[in-house]
Amino acid sequence: MTDTYDGYERLKFDWPAERVLRVTMENPGRMNAADSVMHGELVKVWRDIDEDPRVNAVIIRGAGDAFSGGGDLELVKEMTQDFNTLNRVWKEARDLVYNVINCSKPVVSAMEGPAVGAGLVAGLLADVSIASRTARIIDGHTRLGVAAGDHAAIVWPLLCGLAKSKYYLMTCEPVSGEEAERIGLVSLVTEPEDLHDKALEVATKLAKGAPGAVRFTKYALNNWLRMAGPTFDTSLALEFMGFNGPDVQEGLASLKEKRKPNFDPESPL
């Protein structure tokens, strides 16, 4: 008998507690960067979780010492050269945001190291976001040469206000886990060695709660995000328009120069 999650390649699954599913993003040697396979799987997994009666709560984390190192540069390059790829990734980016928001099961994220790109979408849209003090949260859109679209335009202003959002989204300055908690970007901050235990503690508490009450509370609160739908759609369109412009070519060249072999941990996208 096949399991719901058997077909996944970049996402790994385990059950650390009763009715708690843990999803681990894994792209070895790439700091869990979201390549074409992972990007698609991050879209699909939330539908599978939503329909899985065994799951009451979810943890999303990265393998090793990184949450997600950003977008795969080969995929970005392909997007600038092939319309079908660009169109597919645009649809996936839209669905990823809405699928996390609409997943009825509560999601807990455990972020350490670099937290960038598609992984960060799930990290910040999680119902309870937990970061280690040494996490480096970066929205790398403008560094790449495109507008800060997808989740950023809807969730950052709600979490930490417009002034902080403009600063971090336009400058791509990294936000430490400690600073992220201070400005309200994440729910909790922990010491690095305590991160995964804390995530499991919170997820277990949610899994043991009244399922209907927890899920409908999530649904009601996420209406704030759904109300921002027009802003989200516009920001996503502006982002993907940029892949046909000159800025992204300069951004790609700069990032390729900065990234060292085996993915320099100081150089996430």
Image: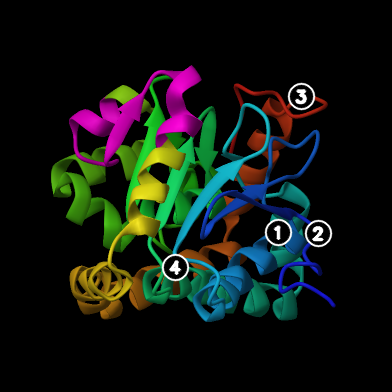
Q: Looking at the picture, how far across and down is residue 25, in whole percent?
A: 66, 48
Upstream in sequence: badge 3 or badge 2: 2
Q: Considering depth in this image, is 56 or 253 the residue closer to the camera?
A: 56
Which is closer to the viewer, label 3 or label 4? 4
Q: Which mark is residue 260?
A: 3
Upstream in sequence: badge 1 or badge 3: 1
Which is closer to the viewer, label 2 or label 1? 2
State the separation of the CA atoms marked 1 and 3.
22 Å
Q: Residue at x 71, y 29 (%)?
A: 259
State the separation of the CA atoms marked 3 and 2.
25 Å
Say whether residue 182 is magenta. Answer: yes
Q: Looking at the picture, how far across and down is residue 96, in whole percent?
A: 51, 69
Q: Which mark is residue 210?
A: none
Amino acid carrying mark 2 in the image: Glu
Q: Residue at x 75, y 37 (%)?
A: 30
Q: Considering depth in this image, is 267 or 8 the residue closer to the camera?
A: 8
Identify the residue under disc 2: 9
Pointers 2 and 4 in contact (C-beta within 8 Å):
no
Secondary structure, mark 3, is loop
Q: Looking at the picture, how far across and down is residue 174, in whole percent?
A: 41, 29
Secondary structure, mark 2, is loop
Identify the residue under disc 1: 38
Residue 206 in view of the camera: yes
Amino acid carrying mark 4 in the image: Val
User: Which residues fall within the magenta stretch?
Assistant: 179-198
Pointers 2 and 1 in contact (C-beta within 8 Å):
yes
Identify the residue under disc 4: 100
Pointers 1 and 3 in contact (C-beta within 8 Å):
no
Upstream in sequence: badge 3 or badge 4: 4
Upstream in sequence: badge 2 or badge 4: 2
